[in-house]
Image (cartoon, rainbow, N blue to C red):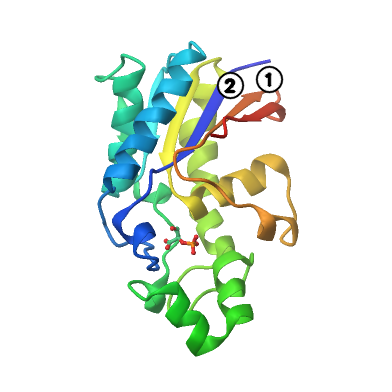
Amino acid sequence: MSGTLVLVRHGQSEWNLKNLFTGWRDVDLTDQGHGEARAAGQKLKERGLKFDIAFTSDLQRAQKTCQHILDAVGQSDLETVRNQALNERDYGDLAGLNKDDARDKWGEDQVHVWRRSYDVPPPGGESLKDTGARVWPYYLHDMQPHVLRGETVLVAAHGNSLRALIMALDGLTGEEVVKVELGTGVPIIYRLNADSTVASKEILDR
Ligand SMILES: O=C(O)[C@@H](CO)OP(=O)(O)O
């Protein structure tokens, strides 16, 4: 066994609440989202988790979630690395559109394919495969070495950037990843083997 990787999708954002495609738009957390992030930190504190390093994206909803968690576990000043590689999938021309309006315009099935399929990009945006092509190399180069040294690593990011990471960690196919949904502010704890494979996975659901 080596180290621990804790993945957390940011708390509810203003545009999650308004049901808008968000992608790289830099929207804030809602009050509920701040609360979800604090609650995630509290759960991790109850587990006795202490982090060695934290990673987050270039977007404030993930950064604020990361800070709430670190505050809750008593590590407010922990080294935190911000990188665009962990940003949400770029939703392209869909960003800012209401998801129900998009379903009315293009149909339920097409919108589901854009939101959850592996390799079909939304117009002007990234497919999950494209997102994985930046998330996975970043994980391998910058994050995994910490885990393999036995450290405990926090990653506060986004629904689809984390789906791409989970797809690779869990060895899911493009068909299997369609069903993966991440709740806001729900920590997922991976323990890795020394050979970098997954030893265990635990979801701290509400
Ligand atoms: O709008 C987005 O950027 C994402 C995450 O909130 O939405 P979806 O769940 O539709 O991929």
**Residue in the image at 63% along x and 16% along y:** 2
**Badge 1, how many Cα within 10 Å: few under 14, some, many 20+?**
some
Q: Is residue 60 above or below residue 52?
A: below
Q: Tell me the element at label 1.
A: loop
Q: Along the line of sight, which residue is nearer the eye, 146 or 41? A: 41
Q: Position of residue 129 (x, y in %)?
A: 59, 62
Q: Residue at x 48, y 43 (%)?
A: 138
Direction from residue 199 to residue 184 in the image, left or right: left
Task: Judge the density around disc 2: few (<14), some (14-19), many (≥20) Cα neighbours within 10 Å.
Answer: some
Q: Are marks 1 and 2 in contact (CB under 8 Å)?
A: yes
The label on residue 6 is: none
Name which quarter of the figure residue 42 lies in: top left
Report the disc number at residue 194.
Answer: 1
Amino acid at circle 2: Leu
Which percent across, then down, holds residue 108?
A: 59, 79
Q: Which residue is mark 2?
A: 148
